[in-house]
Image (spheres, grey):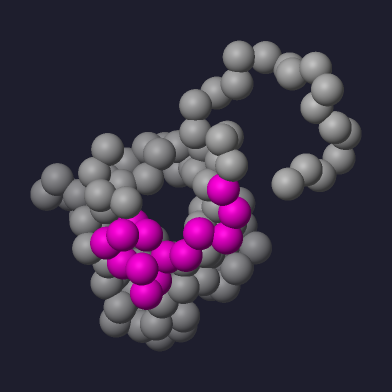
């Protein structure tokens, strides 16, 4: 996997939770801001604001317009991005780690730390 976005762009990505199964990142930028090339494992992205972005990877380029409140699957990938709109980008990424081997005995019901 390529560079960790928290390392390449610590002013834009922050870790809000991490355990042995997931890492949760908050992403926030302003119009015109761009990220350095970085990678994400399989993830779920939840948009907290509406925004427009350009993603670039391996000579390919795509422009996206996303509405607030969406949850989207994002397969593992490497890219660089830029806010090409006139609004702030604000999103949460739930990055998946290695899958569990099964249900663990003694796992408490409900939220856990």
Image coordinates of residue 71 in percent, x first then y, are 60, 51
Let me know if residue 113 is in the magenta part: no
For image coordinates 14% across by 45% down, the residue present is 58
Is residue 88 something one can see in this rendering? yes
For image coordinates 88% across by 34% down, the residue present is 109
Seen in the image, is 110 located left or right of residue 39? Answer: right
Position above or below: 43 against 83:
above
**Residue in the foreground of this view, choosing between 65 and 89:** 89
- Placement of the N terminus among the 4 image quadrants: top left
**Residue in the foreground of this view, choosing between 53 and 9:** 9
Seen in the image, is 17 located left or right of residue 29? Answer: right
Is residue 55 something one can see in this rendering? no
Q: In which quarter of the image is residue 102?
A: top right
Which region of the structure is painted magenta?
A: 5-18
Position above or below: 22 against 71:
above
Q: Quadrant of residue 74?
A: top left
As drawn, the residue found furthest toward the right would be: 109
**Residue in the foreground of this view, choosing between 46 and 39:** 39
Count of numbered circles on the image: 0
Image coordinates of residue 96 in percent, x first then y, are 52, 37
Image coordinates of residue 63 in percent, x first then y, are 32, 61
Image coordinates of residue 62 in percent, x first then y, are 28, 56
Position above or below: 77 against 32:
above
For image coordinates 24% across by 44% down, the residue present is 2
For image coordinates 46% across by 73% down, the residue present is 28
Seen in the image, is 54 located left or right of residue 66? Answer: left
As drawn, the residue found furthest toward the left would be: 59
Let me know if residue 16 is in the magenta part: yes
Q: In which quarter of the image is residue 22?
A: top right
As drawn, the residue found furthest toward the top would be: 101
């Amino acid at each position: 996997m390529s560079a960790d976005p928290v390392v390449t762009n610590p002013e834009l990505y922050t870790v809000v939770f991490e355990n042995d199964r997931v890492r949760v990142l908050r992403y926030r930028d302003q119009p015109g801001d761009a990220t350095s090339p970085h990678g994400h494992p399989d993830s779920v992205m939840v948009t907290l604001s509406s925004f427009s972005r350009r993603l670039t990877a391996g000579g390919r380029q795509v422009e996206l317009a996303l509405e607030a409140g969406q949850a989207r699957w994002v397969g593992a990938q490497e890219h660089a991005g830029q806010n090409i709109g006139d609004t702030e980008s604000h999103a949460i990424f739930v990055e998946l780690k290695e899958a569990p081997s099964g249900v663990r005995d003694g796992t408490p019901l409900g939220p856990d730390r």
